[in-house]
Amino acid sequence: KIIIMKVALITGISGQDGSYLAELLLDKGYKVHGIKRRASSLNTQRIDHLYQDPHHPNQRLKLHYGDLSDAMNLTRIIQETQPDEIYNLGAMSHVKVSFDTPEYVGNVDGLGTLRILEAVRILGLEKKTRIYQASTSELYGGIPENKNESGFYDEFSPFYPRSPYGVAKIYGFWITKNYREAYNMFACNGILFNHESPRRGETFVTRKITRAVSKIALGLQDKFYLGNLDAQRDWGHAKDYVRMMWMILQADQPEDWVIATGVTTKVREFVRLAFGEVGIELEFKGDGVEEKAYIKVCNHKDYQLEIGKEVLSVDPTYFRPTEVDLLIGDPSKAKKKLGWVPEHDLKFLVKDMMESDLRLMKKDVILLKAGHKILKQAE
Ligand code: NAP
Ligand code: F7E
């Protein structure tokens, strides 16, 4: 009996979603190719565990050096790997940083998508290769009047991006839709709302919070700084969302899909929940840039902090020139047509991230006790 192994190519395989998706596809028996950027330091920590032995003939994960700004490189890799499915997850994905590097983001997040689609077309793979494009809830921009009658953003809500990242991603959205309609390609957008995990990049707000709270609880740090505490996001777990990426490419028809939880939460509330995981209750005092959080109750035997201690202040450095105030998505279509059921809620997400960061920071405590210096990481 001949078993035909499906072949997938993932751009952005070293990122949060790329690593979970690679795991999922390997579990399903795929041969997985990933594109990684050359960096002066190792950048594959999130996928290193997927390599047992890179030289083993049965190793089903293969990495290729590449970059979404390099059309020739992308075309060659697609030609060599002949993928059944391409997941275009590669991007400069930080909204605040996109205000500092707008041209680069336009090139990579916007034109990078075109380069993938056009390579598939030039190589005559339109019929064979299905393409998933990592679209985003940032396309909506949080404009209140663009929500549907029930108060959610869905597949019909108008777009109004509010950052160079959102503007680049809107090009990616439309060029994917255009190639689907113009060349009959199986190319789909997943309009994913925020999704987090223990593997989330350290400078996104949830991970910044769980790292800082873990350090504060362990006595490694006194306090931390955030920007807009009133921003609201629809936060899901990345593991649920990469499963949906795969389901989108197994659907009967190529379409665009909203993936969200339908629940929105303030940044301030996420801070409360994270401190709650180490038995600490906070009190917030002051308004706007003067707002601060103090320890009100501390009842965990392992984490004893002084009552009244200031642990959080607002730093306007983290404000964005244009902010997306509130996002909340309606995933009804994905639930109804593809049977997607998220397995993790916000409470589990916070617990998962806190447990992981506490474990990570405890290693620093051991190093400190052994006389090592801990370098402060950039926020
Ligand atoms: P991430 O952790 O920031 O990962 C981004 C990946 O893209 C990394 O592997 C990164 O490589 C790679 N990359 C960056 N620039 C590249 C370039 N010029 N050429 C090739 N690869 C490049 O992002 P994520 O959270 O996994 O998100 C995955 C995708 O979904 C992104 O496109 C993001 O914009 C989109 N998205 C994310 C969310 C979310 O909430 N997470 C929601 C909606 C959409 P390095 O490791 O070398 O940096
Ligand atoms: O910010 C506020 C900030 O950077 C969330 C990306 O994956 O999801 C992500 O984009 C909110 C914003 O994610 C800090 O102003 C307050 O309102 O975690 P974030 P994001 O901008 O929503 C979308 C769907 C994507 O597609 C993106 O790729 O939190 N906030 N204080 C802060 N944010 C950060 N980063 N740091 C702060 O100190």
Image: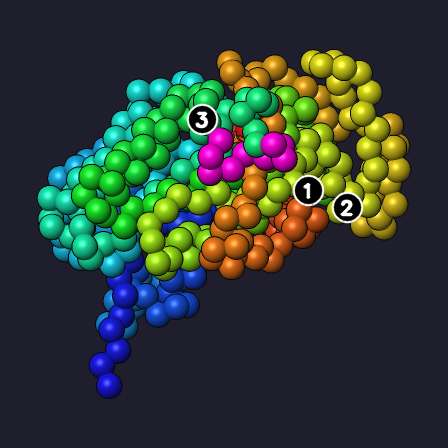
**Residue to which mark 2 is pinned:** 278
Expressed as whole percent of the image width and height from the top left, the position of residue 194 reads 53, 39
Q: Is residue 108 above or below residue 164?
A: below
Q: Viewer-nearest of labels 2 and 3? A: 3
Expressed as whole percent of the image width and height from the top left, the position of residue 206 reads 60, 37
Expressed as whole percent of the image width and height from the top left, the position of residue 376 reads 57, 32
* Mark 2–mark 1 distance (CA, rounded to whole Å): 8 Å
**Residue to which mark 1 is pinned:** 214
SS category of the residue bearing label 1:
helix
Q: Is residue 372 above or below residue 286?
A: below
Expressed as whole percent of the image width and height from the top left, the position of residue 208 reads 60, 35
Quarter assignment of residue 33: bottom left
Q: Amino acid at mark 1?
A: Ser
Q: Amino acid at mark 3?
A: Phe
- Is residue 150 rendered magenta in the image? yes
First in sequence: mark 2 or mark 1?
A: 1
Q: Residue, x 53% and y 53% (percent of image)?
A: 335
